[in-house]
Image (tube, rainbow, N blue to C red):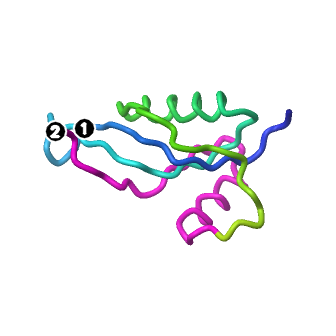
Amino acid sequence: MGKEIWVGTIEISYFDHEAPGTRKNAFTVVTTWASSPEEFRQKCEIMLESYGWKLLDIDRANPAPEDYDYNDEVADQLERTRVNPNAIIYGTFHTYPVM
């Protein structure tokens, strides 16, 4: 199977740079080239680990349908991914309290 652009919502954990020692969790949208759910996960883990962040879960990830009406941020991510075969692009972090 050839590579396609995938889009997925992932849950991550990271330390807040403004409050060292404070862990935060967030959801974000990631776009990247992949050929399977496993490759999408692997690319997310590699990207996150490069920042010292951790992948908690993948909410959903699929090849990006061309005819879907994406919001402006995700549409921009997809366009940037389209022109860069090595891209792993994440969007805005939507944080929530850690219990």
Task: Return the x and y of residue 88 as percentages of the image width and height.
Answer: 58, 43
Q: Residue at x 77, y 45 (%)?
A: 4
Tell me which numbered mark, 1 or 2, is placed earlier along the sequence.
1
Describe the element under mark 1 as helix, strand or loop: strand
- Binning the other alpha carbons within 10 Å of mark 1 as few (below 14), some (14 to 19) or many (20 upward) gives some
Number of numbered discs overlaid on the protein picture: 2
Q: Residue at x 51, y 43 (%)?
A: 59
Label 2 near label 1: C-beta < 8 Å? yes
Task: Return the x and y of residue 18 as percentages of the image width and height.
Answer: 17, 48
Describe the element under mark 2 as helix, strand or loop: loop
Q: Is residue 69 above or below residue 45?
A: below
- The kind of residue on which mark 1 rests is Phe
Q: Residue at x 39, y 39 (%)?
A: 12
Question: Which quadrant does the N terminus fall into?
Answer: top right
Task: Return the x and y of residue 10 as percentages of the image width and height.
Answer: 48, 43
Task: Return the x and y of residue 31 as percentages of the image width and height.
Answer: 60, 49
Question: Which quadrant does the C terminus fall into?
Answer: top left
- Binning the other alpha carbons within 10 Å of mark 2 as few (below 14), some (14 to 19) or many (20 upward) gives few
Q: Nearer the viewer, residue 19 or 70?
A: 70
Instruction: Find the magenta span and give its range.
Output: 70-99
The answer for how far apart the CA atoms under marks 1 and 2 are is 6 Å
Is-magenta flag for residue 67?
Answer: no
Residue denoted by label 2: 22
Q: Is residue 49 left or right of residue 60?
A: left
In terms of image quadrants, where is residue 36? top right
Residue denoted by label 1: 15
Q: Nearer the viewer, residue 51 or 97?
A: 97
Is-magenta flag for residue 98?
Answer: yes
- The kind of residue on which mark 2 rests is Thr
